[in-house]
Amino acid sequence: MRKRSLLLVAILLVGVVLGAAYAAMAQERPVTIRYWADPRFVSMIGMEDITKEPGDYERLQAQRFMEMYPHVTVEVQSLAWEDLQPKVVAAIMAGNPPDVLKDYLGRTAQYAHAGLLEDLYQILPPEVLADYNPSFLDLYTINGELHALPSHAWAAVMAGNRRVWEAKGVAHLLPDPDNPRWTIDEFTEALRAVAEPGALWPLGMYFSPDGQGDYHYLAFFWGFGANLYNDDFSAVALNSPEGVRALEYLVELAREGLIQPGSTTASAAELENMMWRGHVAIQGATLGIWNTLEVARQDGRVLTDVELFWAQHPHVPGVDRGLAVGPTGFAVFKQTDDYKRYWIGKFLEFIDSPEYQREYVLNSGQFPTRLSVDNPLVNDPHYAGVNRMLQELGAEDLGLTSPKYNEVRALLAPQLQAAILGQKTPAQALADFEREANRVLQQP
Amino acid sequence: MVKGFFRRVYKGRWGYFFILPAYFFFAWFTLIPLYEGLKLSFYRSTLRGLTYVGLDNFRRLLSDEAFHYALRNTVIFVLIVVPLVLAISLMLALAIFPMSKRWQSVYRFAFYLPAVASSVVLSMVWLWIYNPTYGLLNYLTGLIGIEPIAWLGTVEWALPALALVVVTWTIGQPVILFIAALGAIPNDYFEAAKIDGATGWQTFWKVTLPLLRPTALFVLITQTIGVFQVFVVVLLLTRGGPAHSTQTIVYRIYETAFQFFDFGYAAAMSGVLLVLVGLIAVLQYRFLGREVEY
């Protein structure tokens, strides 16, 4: 009897222990996701008070995800634009990259070529990927792998202050809003009509030594019919008669005082400030400049009357080129834990849902990559116009997914600077660029 | 000999014990990274991984035009900034030293402030000062009829413009050192010189300057080492432009590592910089560091 009692107690104890173990296994294991993001989204519409600083919006998103899945912790870090590459690269070399990175295609593609990223075709369900514009998925597929999830994309145009031309009674020189295209001659005439030596330099340009904003000066090369790369990206092709003519044109504009002084080391922020002060009348931009203008007005930095208009970069008659397109996506660095990989996939689905893409689009003026997004800007005339132009003329290839994209674009800016400053002739500058860039492209 | 070594270590055991924490940090954050960096310079190190290449990285430096620009610009930068800092800080110290203690404190604070202020904030201010269209400097030069200059946007002016920024940032510490050194000179020497009928200029050349030599040597060597490593002002104001005219060695190292992902090659450049700066410091000390006769 006593032995039987003891046996029953033992069985009971084993049952309790096994039951507890089973209950523990049934609960989700805690997992932490490190998410680094660019600082694009601040002062979000309707959430201005709680998204004042870069990273605030991403932390809100993370909070919502963590409320849905309490066992998941998402640690958000927002990086300044100039830190995006150095900090991520330093983390990679230290063996400690983030789990998820929101960044520009030109940078995530470099990490993909180095074999550092997960293939999202293996992580995300087919039904989710089916909602993405196939051309964006193709753009993001490198060596058969989806290296990042495309989220939103800008298209580069020119943005100008109509009031400058109206004040001089020459607004008729601006392109028709229904078809905002102009030839090189029309563009030059419009610039000359509003130039004021020492006070207003019509065209704002910058040639950042690290290649940031390269699409704005490349658009002039395309307008003359030049190409940046050859067909298979094995060599650069900018050193052509068309390319030399394009650079000669920019040099001539600078000599005439139609480009602002100090363009060779100016930054995008400086250029915008010059526009809000009335020192520059038109510059390369994306549709996000309308939001930027509103923020500048709230900060009290707009010191002149500004009404923005947009137009394509000018072109030589007979040359029809597209717009530069720059997408941002979510990349996942290689994981060793299948369980964590699964939850990163769920996080990606969450932060790139159609609802969030709608917010991205509304707050940045960019284009969604998902087909089911209820686009809030579809009736915005500027947005619709740029979209129409994209459909008609297509997108230009910046070589964003080329393995040497970073190096090649950093080699071009100093040569353009040298030409603008008269240190080299345009032909010499482009020849030097071709020699250096092709040497880099030929390296393994 | 070994026994003697251990005997000496044992004799100074408490001294070693007290410097051990500082030495640990020095080893962990300076010596080990230095060793690892030098080791890396013999490898091709990219995001894809490591491959041993021997002296290839150093051979590449011989034909790398951009590195030659950077080396040349850095040397020019040092030749502009260091003598200016030495001369200006000495003059300021001579002007401040005779003042009352209160005014000495005010001026010491004023000149040392840039050294402790955020370099990012200072750079933003200088960007505004140098702005070609609404900057303060062009406004002031415009008052005397000089046409606006793109200070940071032209090859002729960009490097001198950066040099001026660095001079204002680094002048504080030498001023304080020189003031302290002037205070350490015994008054007897000045009285003796006065009795002997020396003029102010003679007193300065024959008494003050020789007695300031150790401090001047220290300032010269530390400023040379510091200015050779100029980086922040280039990163924030010109990013090496225009047309490589402000490209410096450390900025080139940063570009090579973090933009071009060529860490081994960047490490090779760092090695060359280390040797160069070390050599210059040794030469300065050897030729300028002879003892002063009293």
Image (cartoon, coloured by chain):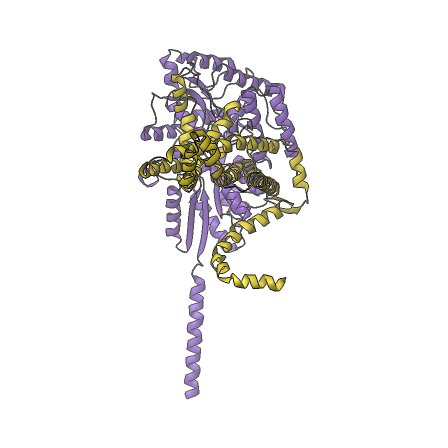
Chain colours: A purple, B yellow
Q: Quadrant of residue A300?
A: top left
Q: Quadrant of residue B43?
A: top right
The quadrant of the picture occupied by the N terminus of chain B is bottom right
Let me know if residue A140 appears in the view. Answer: no
Classify B293 as above or below A187. Answer: below
Residue at the outermost front position: B196
Between B280 and A86, which is closer to the camera in this rendering? B280
Residue at 43% over, 26% down: B130
Q: Position of residue A287 (x, y in %)?
A: 42, 28
Count of labels shown?
A: 0
Q: Position of residue A390 (x, y in %)?
A: 49, 26
Seen in the image, is A2 located left or right of residue A313? left
Q: Position of residue B221 (x, y in %)?
A: 52, 39
Q: Position of residue A385 (x, y in %)?
A: 44, 24
Between A4 and A105, which is closer to the camera in this rendering? A105
Classify B211 as above or below A391. Answer: below
Between B283 and A343, which is closer to the camera in this rendering? B283
Seen in the image, is A420 located left or right of residue A437? left
Residue at 42% over, 81% down: A8
Residue at the outermost bottom position: A1
Let me know if residue A402 appears in the view. Answer: yes
